[in-house]
Amino acid sequence: MAHSSASFLTIAVVSILLLANGASAASHLNFTDMLVNGGQYTTFIRLLGQTQVSKQIDNQLNNSNDGFTVFAPTDNAFNNLKPGTLNDLSDQQKVALIQFHVIPKFLTFTTIKTASNPIRTQGNGDEPYNVNITAQSNGNQFNVSTGVNNVSVTNALNVTAPLAIYSIDEVLLPLDLFGPKTPVTPANAPEAADKKKGSETNETTSSDDTSPKGDGFSVSRSVGWFGWLVMTMMSFGMLTVM
Ligand SMILES: *[C@@H]1O[C@H](CO)[C@@H](O)[C@H](O)[C@H]1NC(C)=O
Ligand SMILES: *[C@@H]1O[C@H](CO)[C@@H](O)[C@H](O)[C@H]1NC(C)=O
Ligand SMILES: *[C@@H]1O[C@H](CO)[C@@H](O)[C@H](O)[C@H]1NC(C)=O
Ligand SMILES: *[C@@H]1O[C@H](CO)[C@@H](O)[C@H](O)[C@H]1NC(C)=O
Ligand SMILES: *[C@@H]1O[C@H](CO)[C@@H](O)[C@H](O)[C@H]1NC(C)=O
Ligand SMILES: *[C@@H]1O[C@H](CO)[C@@H](O)[C@H](O)[C@H]1NC(C)=O
Ligand SMILES: *[C@@H]1O[C@H](CO)[C@@H](O)[C@H](O)[C@H]1NC(C)=O
């Protein structure tokens, strides 16, 4: 009895080990090598190396069950960018740009068309690094829209689980880096806090000139609107108690 359940356990453990081994062997593929074989992705490969994104993908391919979908811009795509576009990006922005071309999920021509928008990429920044996919129901064609540009995808380099690589003729431009520049909002939290501090300092300074120290009114002024509200509530409370 004990013997048979022990051998069952052994068999189970061995099968799990074999399965795990088989799975990692199957996913032991080199992403960069595939692009090299593609022949027209030298800029993308260089950026993948510089930003270490290729290392991330190679590492994660071994461990991720979801796989990856990569949009690989051709050398032409990079050549068609406005001159200086890449040079104007900081290292961190380059990482975000390259990660924007990676979806942490294996998507075939069929499954990408039914994936629900927006689709999260690996990019990170102030604004979400999402894309929307639109497609006609028939045919191996879909469009990726970033909010800045729409890129047509018709050509796959290799779609074999767990990695799908599609070729694109235009670099995907994330809204966060290439969208209309939103004016700097003063409502921004740390800035607002600084402003408040500043005005309090100035208030104190000016109250030195205009009114004697310890004057109740100037205190309530520097405490501001919130203080006024609290004081009003307090006097209201006192009235109620009375
Ligand atoms: C993939 O191949 C490239 C060059 O062909 C090499 O530099 C890199 O180390 C390889 N990555 C892995 C995870 O084997
Ligand atoms: C991925 O797994 C294979 C097989 O287990 C191993 O040889 C390879 O070094 C692993 N690659 C990385 C980047 O961990
Ligand atoms: C994709 O975009 C092209 C133009 O960029 C447009 O002609 C085509 O209709 C779009 N297709 C889909 C499925 O959105
Ligand atoms: C995706 O589509 C939604 C709904 O139409 C829209 O609000 C959003 O801005 C789009 N995002 C991108 C990146 O195009
Ligand atoms: C991109 O495509 C979406 C929907 O497919 C459309 O609403 C949007 O206007 C297009 N944007 C550009 C820049 O072509
Ligand atoms: C696609 O990738 C798989 C491994 O994932 C490989 O076996 C196959 O040969 C590749 N096909 C091409 C056309 O490169
Ligand atoms: C505070 O005073 C300084 C110098 O007098 C001035 O430059 C600054 O703009 C003032 N800040 C505010 C919030 O009024």
Image (cartoon, helix red, strand yellow):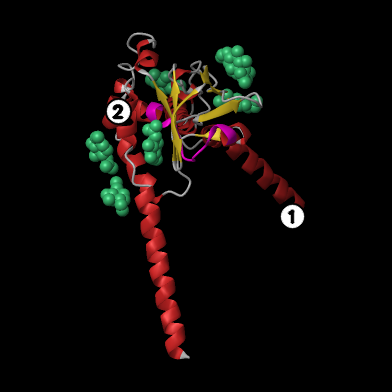
Q: Nearer the viewer, residue 3 or 188?
A: 3
- SS class, disc 1: helix
Which residue is the extreme one toward the bottom?
Answer: 1
Which residue type does callout 1 highlight?
Val
* Residue 92 position within the rendered picture, expressed as x and y whole percent measured from the top left: 33, 29
Count of numbered badges drawn on the protein? 2
Find the magenta span and give its range.
Answer: 97-110
Left or right? Give the position of 109 relative to 11: right
Mark 2 Cβ and ligand 1 under 8 Å apart: yes
Q: Is residue 220 magenta?
A: no
Which numbered disc covers residue 241? 1
Residue 228 visible in the picture: yes
Q: CA distance from mark 1 to mark 2?
A: 81 Å
The spot of residue 171 in percent (x, y) is 43, 19
Q: Classify 127 as above or below 59.
A: above
User: Which residue is tagged 2?
Assistant: 36
Examine the image and state in which quarter residue 209 appears: top left
* Callout 2 secondary element: helix
Query: Residue 95 in the image: x percent, y percent?
Result: 35, 30
Residue 59 placed where, x, y %? 33, 45
105 vs 199: above or below: below
Residue 217 visible at all: no
